[in-house]
Amino acid sequence: MADLYSEKVMDHFTNPRNVGEMKDANGVGTTGNPTCGDIMKMYLKVGVNSDGKEYIEDVKFQTFGCGAAVATSSMVTEMVKGKTLEEAEKISNAAVAEALGGLPPIKMHCSNLAANALHEAIKDYRAKKK
Amino acid sequence: MIYLDNAATTPVSDEVLKVMQPYFSEKFGNPSSIYALGRDAKDAVNTARETVAKLLGASASEIIFTSGATESNNLALKGVCQSAANIIMATPHIIVSSVEHHCVLDSAKYLNKSYGVDVTYLPVNYEGLVDPQDVADAIRENTAIISVIFGNNETGSIEPIAEIGKVVQDARNLRQKAGNKLPLVFHTDAVQAFQYLDIDVDKLGVDMLSLTAHKFYGPKGVGLLYVRKGTKFSPQQQGGAQERNLRAGTENVPYIVGMATAMRVAAEHRAEARNRITKLRDYLTERMKEIPDADLIGPSDPTKRSPHIASFLFKRIEGESILINLDLLGIAASSGSACTSGSLEPSHVTKAMGYGDMEAHGATRFSLGKMNSKTDIDELMKHLPGIVEKLRAMSPIK
C-alpha cells in the first residue's frame, strides 16, 4: 500500500510523545498559521543541570493540525528533552523533518514548524527570567 | 474497508463493466472508419448518445462526450467566452458561484488572467446556497455565461438551478428586446446531482450541463457536456470531425458505452436509491449528535441537501488528523481541509459560507453509496467519538 507518511511519522502521529498541557511550565511558545491550519504550543520546564547549565527538564506540546504537524511536534519534544537550552536552540525544522525520515514536500512549509514553537518557548523562558 | 467517500468516486458496477468489455479488443473499431467494424463502433456510440440524451430530456445531437466533468466545465466556460468575444468584439463577462468545483473556478481565473474576462463570483449564504436574485443583479450587457453547480461536492447543498434558469430567461428576454445579440448561456455542473435528482434540461432551464460517469458506478475518464441546440460556443480541441466538429479526437467507445449504461441504471434506480440513501444520511446526521461540537454544514432543510453527502465541522481539530485515524481503521472519508487536497488553503466552499479558517480546517465529509448500510455508520460511530476526543485533548485550542 502506498503511504502518505513515513513509518516514523505515523508512529509519532498515532503515539505522540509528551502530549498535553503543563501547569508549571516556565516557558511557553506558540506558533502557526490559521490559514494553513496548524497551531503548535510548546511547554517547557527549564532547570539547571549538575554543570550549572540551563536544560530542558520536561517538555510538553499541544497541536492543532494535520498528521505532519502532530508528528513534528512530538518529534521535537523527544529531541530536546534533557538537552541544554543552547543545544535546543540549534535544532531546526529541517532537522526535525530529517529525524522523522522526511515529510511530503507540501508539508515542509506549513506543518513543519515545531522547532519554531520550541524556540518561542525558550525565548519566553528567557524573557520571564529577566 | 468501509467506503464513505462516494462523492469522490465510485467503483465500476459489474453491469457497466460487462457492457464495456467487448469494445476493448473485440469490437475495437474506430467509429470514423467506413467498414463494418468501424460502423459497429459508431452504432454503439450513437446508441449511447441516444440513451444519455433521453435521460436528460435532450436530443442526441445535443450531447458531446468528453473525458470527464473537468473537460466539460473547461469547454463550457472557455468555449462560450471565446464565441462571445467574437460576437461582441470585446471582452465578455462571466458569472460563477463562489462554491464551484475547482475546474470551474480555475477556468474562470484562467479566462480572467489570460484574456481579461471579468468574473463575478456569486456569494452564498451560510447554508451554501446561491440567491437567484444575486444572479439577476450580476447579469450585465456583456455577460456570456453563468455557471452554478447543481449539487455541491463538499456540502451537498442543492442550488436552486430551476429558479436561476427562470431568472436567466427573463434577462435573456430583456436582452433580446434591447437588440443585444449576445447569447446568455446558463451552465450547471451536475456531477453530484445526476444520481439522485431528476434532471430535465428544459425544466431546469439550462443550456449546458456537465456530467462524469465515475460518480455513479461508471468508469473514470469519460463524461459529457449537454449543449442546447443553437448555443454558440467555440470548440477548444482541433483535429477531427468527431462530436459534430465540436470535440476532436477518436471517441472513447468502451467508456462511452459504459457511461450510458451507468446513467441508465442510475436513472432506473434513482427514486429507490434516493429514498434509501437519504434515510442513511439522516441516520448518520442523527448519530453524529453524539459528538459534541460536530456541526452539520449546509442547508438545514433536508430537501435542499444531496442525499449522499453529509459534511461536519469538528471544532478545535483538523480534518486530516481525523481522516488518518479513520484510515488506520479501514474507514475512508474525505475533508475539505488543506492538507489532503494538496493546497494549503482551507476549503473555498466552507469559507464562502462564512466559516473561519480554523473551523474550515475541521470539515470532514462522509458521502454514501450503494455499498453502504446502517452497519457502516454504526462502525464509524464506534470509533469516531474516541478519535475526536483524543485529537481535542491534543489541541491547544479551547
Image (cartoon, grey):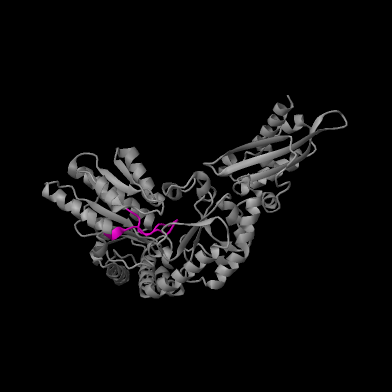
Question: How far across and down, in percent of the image, does residue B165 sit?
Answer: 25, 57
Disc count in the image? 0
- Quadrant in the rendering for residue A69: top right
**Is B130 included in the stretch rendered in magenta?**
no
**Is B151 included in the stretch rendered in magenta?**
yes
The answer to whether any part of residue B237 appears in the image is: no
Question: How far across and down, in percent of the image, does residue B344 sit?
Answer: 51, 44
| Of B3 and A81, the residue lying toward us | A81
In-image side of B247 versus A39 (left or right): left
**Main SS type for the magenta part?**
loop
Could you tell me which residue is drawn at 62 percent across and 38 percent down?
A113
Above or below — where is A74 with respect to B2?
Answer: above
| Of B349 and B128, the residue lying toward us | B128
| Of B47 and B133, the residue lying toward us | B133
Question: Which residue lies most toward the right here?
Answer: A50
Above or below — where is A43 with respect to B255?
Answer: above
Question: How far across and down, in percent of the image, does residue B273 sit?
Answer: 42, 73
> Which quadrant, please, contains the N terminus of chain B?
bottom right
In-image side of B324 versus B355 (left or right): right
Above or below — where is A44 with respect to B315?
Answer: above
Question: How far across and down, in percent of the image, does residue A123 sit?
Answer: 69, 29
Could you tell me which residue is drawn at 50 percent across and 44 percent down?
B357
- Quadrant in the rendering for residue B226: bottom left
Above or below — where is B248 with respect to A90?
Answer: below
Which portion, as a residue range, is magenta?
Answer: B148-162
The answer to whether any part of residue A36 appears in the image is: yes
- Quadrant in the rendering for residue B230: bottom left
